[in-house]
Image: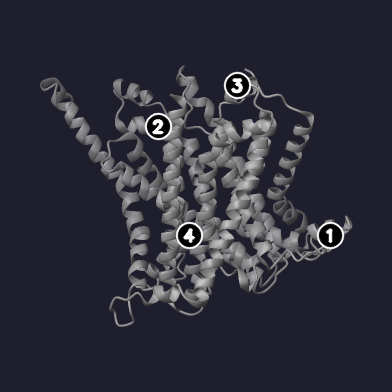
Amino acid sequence: MAALTATAPARPRKLLASRKTRVGILYALPVVVYLLVLFVYPIFTTLFLSLKNADGSLTLHWYAEALTGVNLSVLITTLRISAETALLSLVFGFLLANAISRLKPLWAALAMLIVVVPHFISALVRTYGWIILLGDKGLVNETLGAMSVPGAPFRLLYNELGVVIGTTSMMLPYTVLLLYGVMRGVDRRLLAAASSMGAGRVTIFRRIYLPLVAPGLASAGLLSFILSLGYYITPALMGGPNQTMIATLINQQVTKENQWNGAAAQGVILLLLTFAGLLLVKLVSSLGASRKKRSAS
Amino acid sequence: MMELRKTLAGRITLTAIATVILLFLALPIVVILVTSFSNNAFAAFPPDSWTLGWYKALFADGSKWPAALTLSAFVACLSTVFSLIIGVTAATALTRSELPLRSAVYALVLGPLLIPQIVTALGLFLLFEPAAMLGSPIAIALGHTVLASPIAVLILIATLRGIDERLEDAAASMGASRLTIARRITFPLAAPGMIAAAIFSFITSFDEFYISQFLSSVDTVTLPVQVYNSLTFDIDPSVTAISAILIAFAILALALVALVRWLGSGRQNSLLSVENTAGIAAPGGETV
């Protein structure tokens, strides 16, 4: 190498570049091969299985089955619960992120700790915590009873309310983190400028603040919607028979009924819904970026 | 800088809202920690009397928990090793070399984090079932690596981006070999990030439920699957104790990551006068 540098000063540069490329390919191989074999290939297997008849011919039978009768109502339930979860975690996430972004740095850091730490604790464990809290004799009902709220104890478990409470608490860290980042990026001087020109609080919020954080709100809502779609643990443990979601159905078909083709078709439907959601997220963020560029110029 | 005037009423509402929502996040965790020491493991909060009985029951004869704990720890260790190997190589490729199709590789790495885990689990089931590998700890570890390695890659990319390449170049200019540079410069500076990547890979595998559920057999039940089973089928009060241990474990791991980052954060600054801490974010921040 040293000798080469001495004789031909122009070549080593190119040699170095191609060497860098070769090293890059070599180092990228493990991850690429691993994920192609254990992630991409299995997804294609699922896709083929969902299109295959018992005799090996191609069919859309499994999709037709997945989109009719009970299976269709499970799909609709999944979409409904995900939408409710997304809406609630968006509202609570907005309120909390907004509050944290105005706190003093020390308090904000502490609050963010309470947001982030639960995210790293098993969802199964947190769901169990909710089951203890929301039972007929749990803390929530006992407190409401002690305050002699009419109607207490409420039925908070094994129905849709229970599931939505559970899934919302699982999605909340995502929305808070995303929105907190967006809100920290809002230039406070814009709000002060509007105020100095006589705009009221409501006007500032509606005309300045909301448009600035809108793309973040949309991405956070979509993201929690997508993540809820494939959720299994909380709906299965905190819901009743009417809250069966698509992931539960896939699990049942594989482990109990040996109905792999049907499960594969539902998996592909779930995958397509996820892709559609991700595409929307991308669209929204590019829209937001172009708007930001416009307002800056 | 001018700020919007803050009203007292506004401040009180703000604090009240933040407190209620933070309670909503923290309560499920606090309630488990408290209930695990309670005589009545299922209801009555706050407890009437205290006990360590559930913790003792975990290790009583005939308990399923020690086997599940051992299996989960073994699987998590394996998949941490796999994830670190994949993570170090991939992060090197993505930050320190010229890689064709870089964005495609990046998208492939992000894939497992974005796609519903149940779909990944179903695919792995269809892969390992014909190979008669259901119930094999190796298969479960390989499956967990699909989810854990992207996290390791992302953390290590942030770590390597945070290391000033001029330090490596300077060593090279003074005649250090590639191996010496890796051993004496890059590795010591990347060590905190590698420990963080290892801890997060371990937690990911240790808490993973979907893949374990699909790939487990009667004899190989990981801890999360056992927790799920005892919540659905046989209500076993010691599940509160194991949940509390899992919480303590997660908090300990996060504290460890924070500690390692804090210890490591000063290292590079003593070598460089130019501040360069772009890759050293708050603990856990980059995985989200």
Q: CA distance from mark 1 to mark 4?
A: 36 Å
Q: Nearer the viewer's eye, disc 3 or disc 1? A: 3
Q: Nearer the viewer's eye, disc 2 or disc 3? A: 3
- Residue A213 point in image, percent of width and height: 55, 37
Q: Chain of mark 1?
A: A
- Residue B215 point in image, percent of width and height: 47, 68
Residue A104 in view (yes/no): yes
Q: Count residues near mark 3 (Cα–Cα under 10 Å), then give few for <14, some for 14-19, many for 20+.
A: some
Q: CA distance from mark 3 to mark 1?
A: 49 Å
Q: Which residue is mark 3?
A: A193
Q: Which residue is mark 4?
A: B117
In this rendering, the answer to whether A78 lies above or below B181 is: below
In this rendering, the answer to whether A188 lies above or below A213 is: above
How many tags in the picture?
A: 4
- Residue A187 point in image, percent of width and height: 56, 26
Instruction: Report helix, strand or loop for mark 4.
Output: helix
For the residues tagged 4 and 3, is the chain the same? no
Of mark 4 and mark 2, the one earlier in the sequence is 4
Q: Which mark is residue A142?
A: 1
Q: Chain of mark 2?
A: B
- Asked if disc 2 and disc 1 are in contact, CB closer than 8 Å, the reply is no
Of mark 3 and mark 1, the one earlier in the sequence is 1
Q: Chain of mark 3?
A: A
Q: Could you tell me the amino acid type at mark 3?
A: Ala
